[in-house]
Image: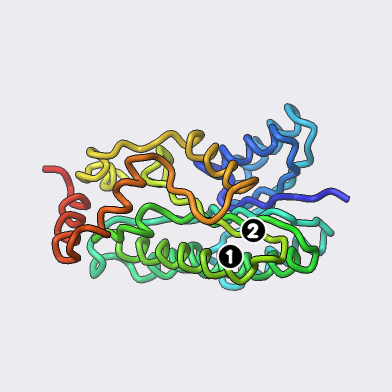
């Protein structure tokens, strides 16, 4: 019976690159995103180049019950999922009080609610089977919550805490749970305003394929969490030796638009 790895947010960026890298290592894939054209193109490219089965499913993970509906669809088609990469996510930049509430709620739905649901549903099947791997994509901002990314930072802090605690609960079950923590990555994620911040000028985005390579290695063989890049690792540790009030002033300056 074929075993599949399901990747959310697979049509662009890190998810797209991880799909290519996993297919090259003969992993069967279920790709999830909202863009049918991009998924069809990727499916065709991967099945043409590699001897793998690639399925795609169109889901908007910000919709109510998205995780349960996606899980039900997979079960109805009798796909056996032994790998899950919760990569889908989005962020926004701006003053919290001025941002649309609907966008905040959609961000929480994708970054938190859907991720928790998919981890629970597919994870339970993996525990029953006694094997599996789940990787959740967190962020450098899991360690360094930034002003003007308030909701996004909070969701990614949640993802890291959730991943580490579930990983501890599942020790000995045969199911590994890990967290990938990239810094800025060169993807369509970044808005024009984000690109004008001091932080992005000081710490240039990493190529998506480089981050994906670290992610695939963590997903297949790693443990715990992985911060991608030495500079990002260094930045994640600064709060340990810097007073909170000073640290927030530094972060606010970095998150501000470059003058």
Image quadrant in which you'd find residue 115? bottom right
**Residue at the image point whose x is 54% and y is 52% from the top:** 87
Give the left or right position of residue 202, taking residue 121 as reference: left
- Give the percent coordinates (x, y) of residue 71: 71, 65
Q: Quadrant of the C terminus?
A: top left
Q: In this view of the protein, which residue sits in the foreground, 226 or 65?
A: 226
Q: Classify mark 1: residues with Cα within 10 Å, few (<14), some (14-19) or many (20+).
A: some
Q: For this view, does 158 lie left or right of residue 239?
A: right
Q: Nearer the viewer, residue 7 or 130?
A: 130
- Given the current orientation, which residue lies at the most extreme left position? 259
Query: Which residue is at 31% across, 53% downward?
Result: 237
Q: Position of residue 89 (x, y in %)?
A: 48, 56
Q: Quadrant of residue 175?
A: bottom right
Check contact, mark 2 vs mark 1: CB within 8 A.
yes
Instruction: State the residue position of label 1.
Output: 167
Q: Which secondary structure lies at badge 1?
A: helix
The answer for how far apart the CA atoms under marks 2 and 1 are is 7 Å
The kind of secondary structure element at disc 2 is strand
Of the image marks 2 and 1, the number of the one nearer the N terminus: 1
Image mark for residue 176:
2
Residue sitting at x 32%, y 67%? 100
The residue drawn where x is 71% and y is 35% is 25
User: 221 above or below 60?
Assistant: above
Indicate left or right for 239 with 215 as reference: left
Q: Nearer the viewer, residue 242 or 148?
A: 242
Identity of the residue furthest to the right in this view? 1
Image spot of residue 196 (x, y percent): 22, 42
159 lies above or below 196: below
Badge 2 crowding class, 10 Å Cα cut-off, few under 14, some 14 to 19, many 20 or more, is many
Report the label total.
2
């Amino acid at each position: 019976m074929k075993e599949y790895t399901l990747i959310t947010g697979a049509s662009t960026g890190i998810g797209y690159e991880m799909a290519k890298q996993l297919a090259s290592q003969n992993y069967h894939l279920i790709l999830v995103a909202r863009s049918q054209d991009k998924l069809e193109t990727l499916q065709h490219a991967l099945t043409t180049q590699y001897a793998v089965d690639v399925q795609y499913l169109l889901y908007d993970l910000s919709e109510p019950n998205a995780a349960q509906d996606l899980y039900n669809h997979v079960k109805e088609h009798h796909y056996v999922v032994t790998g899950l990469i919760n990569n889908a996510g989005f962020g926004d930049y701006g003053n919290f009080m001025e941002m649309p509430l609907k966008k905040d709620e959609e961000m929480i739905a994708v970054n938190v609610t859907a991720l928790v649901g998919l981890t629970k549903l597919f994870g339970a099947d993996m525990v029953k089977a006694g094997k599996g791997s789940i990787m959740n994509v967190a962020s450098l901002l899991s360690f360094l919550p930034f002003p003007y990314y308030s909701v996004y930072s909070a969701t990614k802090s949640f993802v890291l805490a959730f991943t580490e605690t579930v990983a501890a609960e599942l020790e000995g079950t045969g199911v590994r749970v890990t967290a990938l923590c990239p810094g800025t990555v060169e993807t369509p994620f970044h808005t024009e305003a984000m690109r004008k911040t001091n932080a992005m000028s000081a710490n240039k985005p990493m190529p998506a394929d480089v981050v994906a390579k670290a992610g695939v290695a963590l997903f297949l063989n790693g443990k715990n969490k992985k911060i991608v890049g030495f500079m990002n690792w260094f930045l994640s540790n600064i709060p340990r030796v810097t007073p909170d009030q000073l640290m927030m002033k530094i972060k606010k300056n970095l998150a501000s638009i470059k003058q």
